[in-house]
Amino acid sequence: MKIAIHGREFKPEAARLVSQVFDELLNHQITFFISEVFFEILKNAGITIKDPKVFLNQSEINDAEVILSLGGDGTFLETVSMIGALEIPILGVNFGRLGFLASVQPTQIKEAIEKLRSKKYTLDERTMVHTDSSSPIFEKGMNFALNEIAISKTDTSSMIIIHAYINNEFLNSYWADGLMVATATGSTGYSLSCGGPLVMPHSENFIITPICPHNLFVRPMIVSSNSVISLKVESRSSNFLVSMDSRAKIVGDVETELTIRKEEFKAKLVALHGSEFLDTLRGKLGWGTDIRNRITYPS
């Protein structure tokens, strides 16, 4: 079995658990390759690995069965962008905070690797979004996102106006701080914090969610993922920001138009046996927990 591993900076107190990941892989004689950037982080943290194998680009891991993402959801999204159309299944170990995508807890490392080794998992395929633009924004092959594509203003003053079309039919002109097109997977992320609905991950839908709209009657809207969404921007500052998951760039040409549609390939998430989306949802959002039991009042 060949596994690739990617991660980000972690807290010093997590070093023991990060090291345990490699100890378990070595104990099971599993071949693993570490991304160059994460290998440098491990060295700086004082974690030594026997006979390390490091990869620099996609071609060196295109035959990997799984890639481990060690970090939070941001690291997971970075891992998705790293492997792109290779569609290598991803398992996220949560060394971050909330962890919707990186759902394996550090205390479950031994169990998780055993399940990987014995093939006790299924693959959960998730729809992604793809964008084309009238002038280049992101390099070819990197213009996709698992959670959302968002347009937002670049300063703290004026709103921007975003004219939105669905399948060439005018939808609305949004006076707002921004607008995003989120996937069902992304419904638990930025879209949720902007008042968007929760959507089951295999729903074939996109969510158009305004960011701080000036009109109180403007609300998020669910559309089919087979839709083609076109966006045109007006901005007094003559620029705006485009972000795709963890990647962002300032666009200096307000004449730039974006076209958003379903990506041809998908993200494949490793779902270990015994791990269910609704269990994760309840746990992360605290559903069923009565906060009144934890409130203390001053005497």
Image (tube, grey):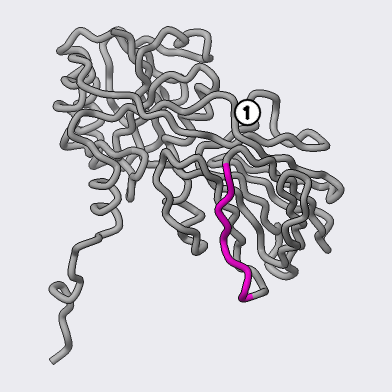
Q: Is residue 279 left or right of residue 266?
A: left
Q: Which residue is mark 1?
A: 142
Q: At 54% from the left edge and 42% from the top edge, which residue is drawn?
A: 245
Q: Is residue 284 left or right of residue 202?
A: left
Q: Position of residue 99 (x, y in %)?
A: 33, 45
Q: For residue 160, which quarter of the picture?
A: bottom right
Q: How many marks?
A: 1
Q: Is residue 222 magenta?
A: yes
Q: Amino acid at mark 1?
A: Met
Query: Which of these two is toward me, 144 or 108?
Result: 144
Above or below, comparing residue 27 to residue 211 in the picture: above
Q: Residue furthest bottom?
A: 299
Query: Which of these two is toward me, 250 or 11?
Result: 250
Q: At 82% from the left edge and 37% from the top edge, which residue is drawn?
A: 134
The region drawn magenta spans: 216-224
Q: At 25% from the left edge and 34% from the top edge, which residue is drawn?
A: 15
Q: Secondary structure at mark 1?
A: loop
Q: At 72% from the left edge and 67% from the top edge, which residue is drawn?
A: 175
Q: Is residue 221 magenta?
A: yes
